[in-house]
Amino acid sequence: MKLVRKRLLHSARTRLFYYKLITYTLLVSLLPISVISPLFYHNAKQKMQQELQLAGANYLKMTVNAMEVVASNIAANFRQLSLDQVIRDFEGFPRGAYYEALNGAYPDDDLPGLYNYLDRKARLLENLRALKLSNEFIWSVYYYDTSKQMVMTWDLMQYKPDSFYDPGWDQFTETIDSFPAFMEMRQARQPDGSVKEVIPIVYMSLARGNYLVINLDAASIYNRFISKLDNKTDSALFVLSKAGKLMLYEKNKTLSAMIEADWQTKGQTEASGHFSYESDYDGRKMLVTGISSETLGWTFVTATALDEMYRSVSYIKSIIMLITFLLVVATGLLVFMTTRNIYNPIRHLLQFIRVKDASGGAAAEGKGSSELTMIRSSLEGAYEDRSSLQLRLMESMPASQEKFIRSLLRKHAIGRDEMAERLRYLDLHLELDGLMLLLIAIEPHAAGSPAESAEVVDMNKLRLVDLAGGTLSVGRRCLVIELSEGVFIALVNCAPSDFQAHFLLAEHIIRDARETIGIRCSIGIGNYCSDYLELPRAYEEAREALRYRTIVGTCEVIYIEDVRLVNTPLFVYPKDKEAALINYLINGETESARRVLADMMRDIRSQQTKAHYRQVQHGFIQILGSLAGASNDLRLDLDKLMAADTNLYSVLLQKSDDWQAVAVWFDEMVVKLTAHIDHAFQEKNNKHVDEVMRMIERDYGEQMSLTVAADRLGLNPSYLSRIFKEKNGETFSEYLTGVRIGKSKALLIGTEMKIKDIGETVGYYKTNYFIKLFKEYTGMTPGEYRKLHVGA
């Protein structure tokens, strides 16, 4: 039992999020059910009551609408009849009463008028007949002409008022106040003496005192509209006239009479137009609803039993409780199934962390943390790794930019899209079309001038870059970087028409550099480049232009077309080998430099018979110029190194007739230069590296990086990275990490500081990252290392 309890507790700690997920999902799922169920029951009960009331009102509206449609149809037929001019012609016929009074033989003079009168009368009777036949609910139609004292009926009959078979038909004349008027239901006597219940509708004719009476068949209306709705034993429906008299009801039903009597007090006092109330009739609870028709002036009343509805509501309550219980059970099962599927990605991620991230995951799991804490710990370590990589990438950005610019100066097959992407990635603001290339070479100080410290020299170089960039970037895009020691390249976007104008800017750079920084420099310019593919050609032209500064003079702007020889036989100078020679020279590789120099001498000598003597001589001068330029770039006095009493160019001209002497002289120069350069660079590099190592030893706990160290020394980060690895055999980051790990080991053994505090002391502010890095270097966590050494 103890083991089982221990496993359950461990599972609860390590799977805390899983159990929280189940709990919260159950709460979220069941809370709506527990709230909705009572509301649903209450709304269902209320809705049924409202639906019942609405159903009663709808029954009445159907009846009212049907009756109003009938009335509207009859009214339309009457309007059509009155507009037919038939009644108007009959009522307005001259001497109509005279013709009605004629008896016996008719005078010949009256016959024409009599015939016209009888024709109008016949047409009127036909219209009365048409009106009766126009609607199935019309039982009979009377027309009364007061001036002629006659009643005409739809069946083409004519009567005197006192001899009309339906006495009392004109009782409305005393109570009617508007037309058309819907009268009370009455007993109408028929020609055969029988009685018919009718509902009169009275219309006034155009002539004052003349009326048209339309008698509706009450039984037909009841059978059509009322009896079909009033078909339940526990309900009632009836119609009341404007005066409140009962009509259109089932006389055999006692319920109708009870409700009608009760309505006389309740219905008329509670509402007008529309009303509804509950009342008990004969032990039954009834819902009474009434609607008044403004068109007919009648009130339609219906009553429905409520006992059955209340029993249905109690059934609904039981059904809701059962459904709620089933929903709770189903929701619980669904929650357990869905939460497991939701949790699966987290479970797989935890397994991955335990396998791949042993340091962070194991440390978090050992503390009994939840799954999310373990995942967070692992992600923090991954973020630290990513931040470290980004930092290293930023540190290497200057070197990448320099490498990219160098690649532009060689022949390549990089496409335009790829080139544009590289410019964006390296944050180089330069267009690919319309380019001008300038090479800025720093001239050495005059003999006897005081030497400057390395820090001052490097700071002056940075000032020169800022000066050149500020001068050339006004209104255009440009880029200025140090290409090699003492040589800077400037790339400027400009139009062909502005190419010559930039020569003046180059002169400003030379003048300002001398006056504000104290640097003497010369600038070589190649021909205009229509796009980036022509940069290698322009670069070689600018380098060639700089070689002529020994002839043109230093601290000048030298354009290749101003100094290039013309109208001479073609002489091919081995420029590629010259570049290799200078590279070997700068790196101190003596034998390689001598081998390349020998190849260059053979190439020049092979052209002696084809080219002009001056061109061959100029080839020797170019070699000397390139060696002199390299010496100037490295702050070396070539004249002093060669122990020359006179100008080296004069010495070369004196030896130019003797190939062997020239070759030996150049070989001696290369040997001395490489030896001196190698020694000077080693001394300088060692000095920089030693200073960086002292800096790391002193400031290892701060935000130390290659870029920070390079900024403090005024060096290029890529250059510092290279010389640091050459001397120590490891990179700056590896050396810094080793120092920090060594310091942390001493603190773990010699102090009781917490692991978190030790990590912050040596420069790691993320504990998980410190633990992971420590294990990579030592094979164990800081806690394990302390336990191993302190315990021993």
Image (cartoon, helix red, strand yellow):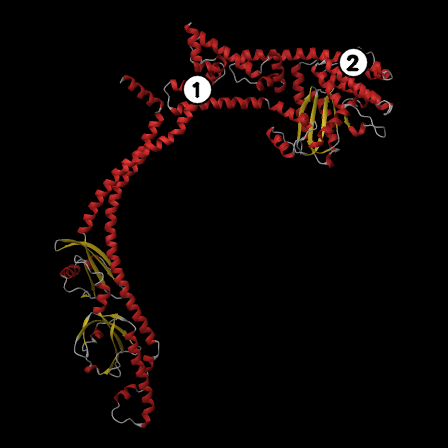
- Mark 2 and mark 1 lie on one chain; the one further toward the N terminus is 1
- Answer few, some or many: residues within 10 Å of disc 2's Cα (few below 14, many 20 plus, some between 14 and 19): some
Q: Say which of 163 and 157 sits in front.
A: 157
Give coordinates of residue 183: x percent, y percent: 22, 70
Q: Amino acid at mark 1?
A: Gly
Q: Amino acid at mark 2?
A: Asp
Give coordinates of residue 449: x percent, y percent: 74, 13
Residue carrying label 1: 360
Residue 97 picture quarter: bottom left
| Secondary structure type for disc 2 | helix
One can see residue 105 in this view: yes
- Answer few, some or many: residues within 10 Å of disc 1's Cα (few below 14, many 20 plus, some between 14 and 19): many
Q: Say which of 734 and 452 sits in front.
A: 734
Q: Is residue 313 above or below residue 470?
A: below
Q: Residue at x 47, y 17 (%)?
A: 770
> Which part of the image, by quadrant, shows the C terminus?
top left
Residue carrying label 2: 667
Q: Is residue 524 above or below residue 256?
A: above
